[in-house]
Amino acid sequence: MKTRRLFFALWPPDSVRQSIIKASKPSMHKLKGRIIKPDRLHITLHFIGPVNDDVRQCMHEAALTVSGKSFDLKLDYLGQFFRARILWLGARVIPVELSELHKDLGQALSACGYQCDRRPFSPHITLMRKCIKPVKHQPEISIPWRIEKFVLVESVQDETGVSYQVLEKYSLK
């Protein structure tokens, strides 16, 4: 049976993507690593992994039941996961609506057999992988992002690498 590799995410509009690129470019220029393509920038809410079409449909229906509120997120912190060698952009202040969206979506997806990651939710946008140098100075970054929806995304592997395809969009109030 064919499976799809899925995740739920916050998907920035092009204007936010361009601001992310512009703000992070000076820092990334000083570091060595593999820069993430702009069209792949996102915040993962829940990584699902490979599922068949029946589970995908269950998850879509579960996501439709989530009635989160829209909110403002300010991306203003450049951080690193040193063990994983990842450079990321996040927020110093996590809006309560984002935490609630993560929790409510996870609970809804549990009806489809999904088990939430036990680690604390750490919302971030991966900017660079295999980053071997630490960021020495915190740059001044302040990127406003109005979050009005979340999406279901498929990660597709082909001969050119991995691409992301948004399958569904879910509006927030």
Image: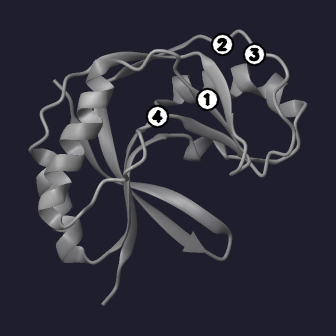
Report the residue marked by disc 4: 123
Q: Earlier in the sequence, mark 2 or mark 1?
A: 1
Report the residue marked by disc 3: 138
Query: Front-most of 50 and 171?
Result: 50
Left or right, 115 with respect to 54, comes to: right
Hey, what amino acid is under mark 3? Answer: Gln
- Disc number lying in front (2 or 4): 4
Q: Residue at x 47, y 36 (%)?
A: 122
Q: Earlier in the sequence, mark 3 or mark 1?
A: 1
Q: Residue at x 62, y 20 (%)?
A: 77
Crowding at dot 1, Cα within 10 Å, few <14 / some 14-19 / many 20+, comes out as many
- The answer to whether marks 2 and 4 mark residues whose Cβ atoms lie closer than 8 Å is no
Q: How many marks are shown on the rendered structure?
A: 4
Give the Cα distance between marks 2 and 4: 16 Å
Give the Cα distance between marks 4 and 1: 9 Å
Q: Position of residue 33 (x, y in %)?
A: 83, 47
Residue 108 seen by the camera: yes
User: In the drawing, what numbered circle is on residue 141?
Assistant: 2
Q: Where, quadrant-wise, is the N terminus in this rendering?
A: bottom left
- Which residue is outermost to the bottom? 1
Hey, what amino acid is under mark 1? Answer: Leu
Crowding at dot 4, Cα within 10 Å, few <14 / some 14-19 / many 20+, comes out as many
Hey, what amino acid is under mark 4? Answer: Pro
Q: Earlier in the sequence, mark 4 or mark 3?
A: 4
Query: Front-most of 135 and 54?
Result: 135
User: In the drawing, what numbered circle is on residue 89?
Assistant: 1
- Disc number lying in front (2 or 3): 3
